[in-house]
Amino acid sequence: MSGPLLVAEDGGALHLKRGMRMPDIALPTSSGREVSFADLPGMAIVYCYPWTGRPGLANPPDWDNISGAHGSTPQAEGFRDLFSGFQQVDAAVFGVSTQPASYQRELVERLALPFEIVSDEQFALQRALSLPTFQTGGVTYLKRLTLAVLDGRIERIYYPIASPAAHPREVCAWLGMIDRSDLRKGGRV
């Protein structure tokens, strides 16, 4: 893999603030159901990623030259490998991309992911939150970003994400250090 190793802060998520309510948008998941992040009780980790390839198929044009484009599979595998840790702190995990749910089902099966991948194929969540994007080959992709959502409100924003493979450990460590009872009372992290 070639291309830039560092992902620069571009201000693409500065408008997202702690306490901001998630939009009530029902999105299809890889399991065939719909989910609205506004309605989820408790903690949910919502990690957005640009695209996942399939073995033997070419990447989108110029993918190797786009900072932050590579890493979706290692990131998903990281959340998979740490899934029991997320369960221990009662945090649900969801991946989000703009790929169709049918495409995402293959990914879930191939990587044996124990969590759902959510399709924002119509860019409804992206538009509602003005999530950062990039384009290549005439196609728009989500930039890599993670939201920790507590009872339907944004609790923490991770952006940019410099190391997709290490990022799940970063989120898991943060969840292990917070006092959830204080958090539910509106305490600061």
Image (cartoon, rainbow, N blue to C red):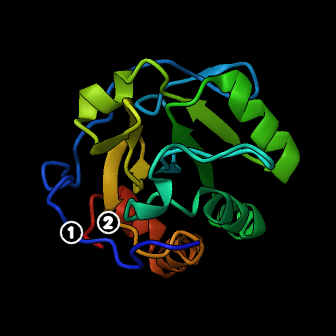
- Which residue appears at 57% of the width and 30% of the height? 99
Residue 83, position as x, y percentages in the image? 73, 63
Name the side, left or right, on which 10 lies relative to 170: left
Residue 186, position as x, y percentages in the image? 27, 58
Residue type, numbered disc 2: Pro
User: In the rendering, which numbered label is found on residue 115?
Assistant: none
> Does dot 1 land on a helix, a strand or a loop?
loop
Q: Nearer the viewer, residue 19 or 12?
A: 12
Measure the C-alpha gap from mark 2 to mark 1: 6 Å
Name the side, left or right, on which 133 lies relative to 11: right
Q: Nearer the viewer, residue 84 or 42?
A: 84
- Which residue appears at 25% of the width and 70% of the height? 188
Locate the N terminus and report the quarter of the image it occupies: bottom right
Can you say whether 166 is above or below 161 in the image? below
Residue 167, position as x, y percentages in the image? 52, 72
> Does dot 2 land on a helix, a strand or a loop?
loop
Q: Earlier in the sequence, mark 2 or mark 1?
A: 1
Q: Nearer the viewer, residue 136 or 33?
A: 136
Residue 12, position as x, y percentages in the image? 19, 53
Residue type, numbered disc 1: Glu
Q: Which residue is mark 2?
A: 160
- Which residue appears at 50% of the width and 31% of the height? 98
Locate the C terminus and report the quarter of the image it occupies: bottom left
Can you say whether 183 is above or below 112 in the image? below
User: In the rendering, which numbered label is found on residue 9?
Assistant: 1
User: How many other residues sit within 10 Å of disc 1, few (<14), some (14-19) or many (≥20)?
Assistant: few
Q: Nearer the viewer, residue 179 or 35?
A: 35
Name the side, left or right, on which 34 lies relative to 33: left
| Cβ atoms under marks 2 and 1 closer than 8 Å | yes
- Which residue appears at 49% of the width and 49% of the height? 49
